[in-house]
Image (cartoon, helix red, strand yellow):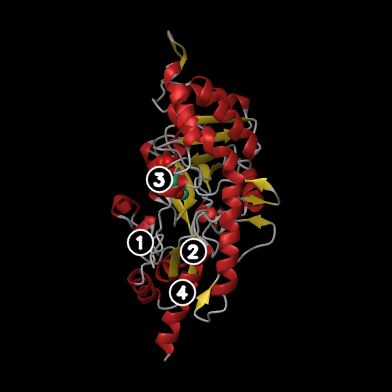
Amino acid sequence: MKVRYSYLKQQFSNSEDLWKNLKKFVSTGDFTLGKELKSFENKFANLIGTKFAVGVNSGTDAIKLSLKVLNVGPGDEVITAANTFVATVGAITEIGAIPVFVDCDDTFCMNVDLLEKKISKKTKAIVPVHFTGYMTDMPKLLKIAKKYRLPVVEDACQSILASINNKKAGCWGSFGAFSLHPLKNINVWSDGGIITTNNKKFYKRLLLLRNHGLSDRDTVKICGYNSRLDTFQAVVGNWLLPSAKKIANQRIKNANYYDKELSKIEEITIPPRIKGKKIVYHLYIIFAKHRDELLKFCLKKGIEAKVHYPRPMYLQENLKFLKHKKGDFPVTDEHTKKIITFPCDQHLSKKEMKYVINCVGEFYRKKTN
Ligand SMILES: *Cc1c(COP(=O)(O)O)cnc(C)c1O
């Protein structure tokens, strides 16, 4: 049996009505900004629970433009998580700022207890990453941010509809940054991103920044970017967004099933599932003994398991100038050796999950015998 990782072929296979919408859209010629984008932004803000949302051309730019609004620039320090995806760091370095890392805990998010030590005179912002669909401990983080008067940009790219006590990712900081990349939980057909905020001044600034700084066709107010969310992609987003809750709920259901069955295997440890914290399982990651062998076994059995990630961001070549060395972030390091990711998406069948569970069980039975 084959258990694929990518479900993109299925995600848009039943989309006759979307094609109709697109055809209608093309006939309007409304290709930049315009009605469909506005409608998508309104729906998105509504879904997350913020006053405003601004579509941009990627999740990376969602972080970058938010930092720009906060006047973060060359030489400023931005604190983020040591185990994130490259894009978080790229958004920081692209504007000349310096990423300062904090280790994670077993929820794959920043260990907020270690945050305060990393704050310096140069710190300009904090970018917690709600990694894998978990939430960073935002109540605790915001207390520290407030104490030092530091603004917060949530990297919520992997955690649309995750929440703590029903307050969703993207509502806690000054900004929430989301990605609409094909591999994310809510995906369009190309790169895309969207920023949530409750602050009207910030909102207005973002509208300028994403569109060359233009306040109207003849007036350039500030130096900006070309970073609009394509209106065409907004049409796709408008079609998919009504399914957002269903998608999250199905992933949660799948993860709960995996948790229940895989926790029976001694060599497997399920990460903490904390009451009041809603995890949306962009990635379903567990800790496994003999991970490398298990991964090989699963791949041989046709299961496209993965490791997110085998080499942490802070040890990548592009960040050599930070002079980090292995061991600087021990929990992140430890994770690279024992994490394994299994497909958990909304298109996965129970049969496929059972097969995964059986294969993992078979591997350890063979291992001990
Ligand atoms: C995907 C992702 C981003 C950025 O997304 P793009 O849309 O690909 O630019 C940022 N941070 C994290 C944690 C991500 O997973």
User: Which of these two is toward me, 103 or 85?
Assistant: 85
Q: Is residue 148 visible?
A: yes
Sequence-first disc among 1 and 3: 3
Residue positioned most to the bottom:
369
Sequence-first disc among 1 and 2: 2
Q: Position of residue 296 (x, y in %)?
A: 34, 72
Q: Position of residue 280 (x, y in %)?
A: 57, 53
Residue positioned most to the top:
218
The amino acid type, in three-letter code, at marker 1 is: Arg
Residue that mark 2 sits on: 285
Task: Note whether 24 is above or below 236 in the view shown.
Answer: above
User: Which of these two is toward me, 242 or 122?
Assistant: 242
The amino acid type, in three-letter code, at marker 3 is: Ala
What residue is shown at x 43% (from left), y 21% (from top)? 32
Q: CA distance from mark 1 to mark 3?
A: 15 Å
Q: Residues within 10 Å of mark 3 (few under 14, many from 20)?
A: some
Residue that mark 3 sits on: 87
- The part of the image, by quadrant, that contains residue 45 is top right
Judge depth for marks 3 and 4 and give the one in front.
4
Q: CA distance from mark 1 to mark 2?
A: 16 Å
Task: Note whether 89 is above or below 298 in the view shown.
Answer: above
Q: CA distance from mark 3 to mark 2?
A: 20 Å
Badge number at residue 311: 1
Q: Position of residue 298 (x, y in %)?
A: 38, 71
Sequence-first disc among 3 and 2: 3
Q: CA distance from mark 1 to mark 4?
A: 17 Å
Badge number at residue 288: 4
- Asked if disc 3 is less than 8 Å from ligand 1, the answer is yes
| Total number of numbered discs in the rendering | 4
Sequence-first disc among 1 and 4: 4
The amino acid type, in three-letter code, at marker 4 is: Ala
Q: CA distance from mark 2 to mark 4?
A: 10 Å
